Image (cartoon, rainbow, N blue to C red):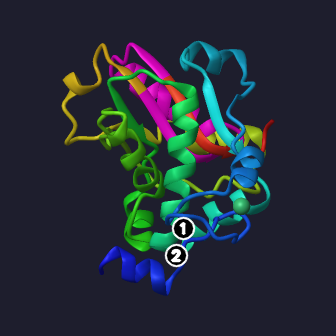
């Protein structure tokens, strides 16, 4: 549809507070100032040694940002994606990351079929494309895992151990000796990022940095 007609029918408003703004996906200055909180997450030593570029969150997993991520994940609506894209773009802009390739945390194929899309891939692809950093689904889940919530820390570790590997369709050369930016929508314990990074390291990645949109950890 022509964008002016679309804007007429659905006037653009801030994803945080519904105030009218100039274009779709744009945040008002109050909300972006409040919600965009780029910070390095404190992680265990083992993870620091593995993800040497640091684990970064663009915001805190609470309030409107949490609602937006959750709603997008479960219904995939395009207007939510626009708001998240502009949030991620502004966050990455502050981070000024360097890297050869961005890699989303993979979903297991049954989950992918059920949801229809990998949210991390969709959320980050355009913002990284703007930065001229290609994104590739270089990892896959080699087996299904239980949902992480409700599991104790130890069980979470066992649940995910060896669950990730280099995607069979991915050329090893794409990862070997490269600086990889691993991305996910949220981080809770960090176990998923940890095991994905292990798989990337095993495949010869030179440096790994992780970025999530939001984390409950401050
Ligand atoms: Zn607002």
Name the image quarter holding the C terminus.
Answer: top right
From this viewpoint, is residue 61 visible? no
- Give the answer, above or below, for where 196 lies relative to 179: below
**In the image, which residues are magenta?**
181-208
Residue at image coords 79%, 38%? 217
Where in the figure is residue 190, as x and y percent of width and height? 65, 36
Answer with left or right where residue 115 lies relative to residue 11.
left
**Quadrant of the rendered image holding ligand 1:** bottom right
Q: Which residue is mark 2?
A: 75
Q: Is residue 182 magenta?
A: yes
Residue at image coords 70%, 57%? 65
Q: Is residue 119 magenta?
A: no
Answer with left or right where residue 30 lies relative to residue 110.
right
From this viewpoint, is residue 210 visible? yes
Image mark for residue 80: 1
Circles 1 and 2, Cβ within 8 Å, touching? The answer is yes
Between 158 and 63, the one lying in front of the other is: 63
Quarter where residue 127 is shown: top left
- Give the answer, above or below, for where 172 lies relative to 106: above
- Give the answer, above or below, for where 72 lies relative to 75: above
Answer with left or right where residue 115 lies relative to residue 49.
left
Graded by Cα atoms within 10 Å as few (under 14), some (14 to 19) or many (20 or more), the crowding at tag 1 reads some
SS at circle 2:
helix
SS at circle 1:
helix
The earlier-in-sequence mark between 1 and 2 is 2
Where in the figure is residue 203, as x and y percent of width and height? 33, 22
User: Outermost residue, bottom direction?
Assistant: 9
Answer with left or right where residue 103 lies relative to residue 29.
left
Where in the figure is residue 214, as x and y percent of width and height? 67, 45
Where in the figure is residue 4, as x and y percent of width and height? 38, 77
Quarter where residue 63 is shown: bottom right
- Mark 1 C-beta closer than 8 Å to ligand 1: no
């Amino acid at each position: 549809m022509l964008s002016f007609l679309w804007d007429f029918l659905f006037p653009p408003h801030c994803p945080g507070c519904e105030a009218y703004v100039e274009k779709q996906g744009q945040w008002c200055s109050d909300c972006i100032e409040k919600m965009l909180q780029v910070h390095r997450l404190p992680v265990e030593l083992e993870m620091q040694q593995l993800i040497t570029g640091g684990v970064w969150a663009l915001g805190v997993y609470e309030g409107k940002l949490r609602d937006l991520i959750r709603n997008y994940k479960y219904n995939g609506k395009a207007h939510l994606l626009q708001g998240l894209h502009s949030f991620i773009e502004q966050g990455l802009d502050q981070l000024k990351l360097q890297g050869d390739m961005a890699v989303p945390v993979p979903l297991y194929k049954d989950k992918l079929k059920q949801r229809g899309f990998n949210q991390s891939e969709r959320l980050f692809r355009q913002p990284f494309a703007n930065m001229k950093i290609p994104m590739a689904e270089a990892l896959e889940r080699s087996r299904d895992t239980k949902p992480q919530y409700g599991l104790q820390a130890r069980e979470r570790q066992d649940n995910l151990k060896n669950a990730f590997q280099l995607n069979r369709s991915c050329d090893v050369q794409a990862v070997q000796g490269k600086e990889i930016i691993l991305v996910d929508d949220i981080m809770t314990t960090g176990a998923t990022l940890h095991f994905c990074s292990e798989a990337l390291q095993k495949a010869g990645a030179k440096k790994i940095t992780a970025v999530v949109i939001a984390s409950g950890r401050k």
